[in-house]
Image: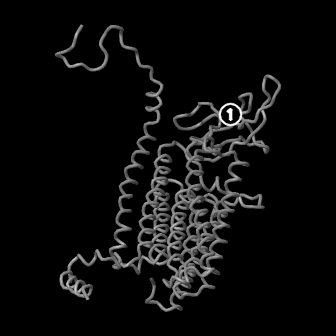
Amino acid sequence: MAETSVSHAHEAHGHGDDTQLWEGGKEPFKASYGKLMMWYFLVSDAFTFAGFLIAYGALRFSMPTWPEPDFVFASFPFVKAHWPLIFVTFMTFVLIFSSVTMVRAVQEGHRENQRGVVFWMFLTILGGATFLGSQAYEWTTLIVHENVTVSQNPFGRHIADGIYLNEDGTEAKKTDGAPDTFVKGESYLLHMHTVAQKDGTVKEELAQRKLKYTTGAYAGQTGVQELGPKAFGALFFFITGFHGFHVFSGVLFLTIIMINAGSGVYAARRNGYEMVEKIGLYWHFVDLVWVFVFLVFYLL
Amino acid sequence: MAGHQTYEEQKALVFRGLMILGVITIVEVIIALFAKGHIIHGVKFSEGFGHYLYMLLMIGFSLFKAYFIIFFFMHMAYEVRGLMLSVLLPTTLLIWAIIAFFQEGSSWGARREQIKEKDEEVVKPAPAGKPQGYLLPGIMKG
């Protein structure tokens, strides 16, 4: 009976003051430990992504030119045409759909519906995998066909109006006989061509056409098509890669949690499939980051 | 936990979320293609006031999408106020980060020529025998 008297004494003493909070069982912010920590992890992750995107903005502002997103991101699988931003819109929709199926999985979890949780999580995983595949296509196009790497960017833009020159220095003409001119801000992509070396071998190089500026501070100056800012390639691969890695780890965790849910691990816990709710928070965050990656890289 | 909603209401929220996010994304892309001159040939908002308006609109749409995802998909609207503030208030620090770093970037961009000059500048070596660096007048020798 000693125990009861102790607890009575404690109640009398601790009633209404903070000592009871240290007994455990009372959740801060009425959220479980796991959910709260997931939120704070996401806050820190948000700062990481914000740091990267702000670095992108600062470097972009520091450059005289920057590649136009609607010129750079214009390829589409199996289509030869120039379809600006359409593929990346498809990728955005894939993520939105997978976010929606994730919400459904969490809702079914609250109802303790095991089959529902597994079904909707499976669709979410499919969405994540589709997104990763799309990103693989986008990267392949840039690296293999357009020769963009972390240290090379063949996407340039003209800094003033001008006219292209032939190899011998005369003004170039288009096939229809009109002068081959360009305007300020016009985008171009440098392509690889083979150059014969002195020792008889050949070397692959980016072909840069000669040109002459006709307006602005550069009027009368000749030059070649310059490569675009290097930082573009590095920032693009690093930031979309970091986001893609979040999607990849998300797919791994979703798979593990789906298997656990299917084998009844969470049903036994009787806590409304809280683990599904936590991975759901993470998955929505990945979609949230994509909203800003989409804004910064493709829309602005 | 969205325990105060019925199951039907919850499913309706999901459908509404899909609609809102999907429609905003489509509108964003259409406006982007229009502003970049892909829809009406020759009509383009790539500089000046039109461009600022375009950027503001895109940022506004994105912030709304972010709000919707956080408050309804991540259920922040149903959490207690303290949790919401402890997650959202720290992110306002980013406003300063954006102002400071974009200012830094533009200033860097405006001084490219000067930075290049300074990078290539050859510093004349100091005459031999003379003390280098800054010395206090009292202990200056020779």
Residue B33 seen: no
Which residue is at the front of the view, A44 or A96? A44
Residue B31 appears left or right of B110: right
The image's colour scheme reads one colour
Identify the residue shown where x is 71% and y is 41%. A180
- Point out residue A43 in the picture as x, y percentages from the top left corner: 42, 63
Figure quadrant of residue A196: top right
Q: Crowdedness of circle 1 by 10 Å Cα count: few (<14), some, many (20+)?
A: many
Identify the residue shown where x is 35% and y is 55%. B96
Identify the residue shown where x is 35% and y is 58%. B93
Which residue is at the front of the view, B37 or A83? A83
The amino acid type found where label 1 is placed reads Lys
Chain of the residue on which disc 1 is drawn: A
Residue extending furthest front?
A1
Q: Mark 1 points at which residue?
A: A210
- Point out residue A63 in the picture as x, y percentages from the top left corner: 51, 43
- Point out residue A150 in the picture as x, y percentages from the top left corner: 61, 44
Q: Secondary structure under badge 1?
A: strand
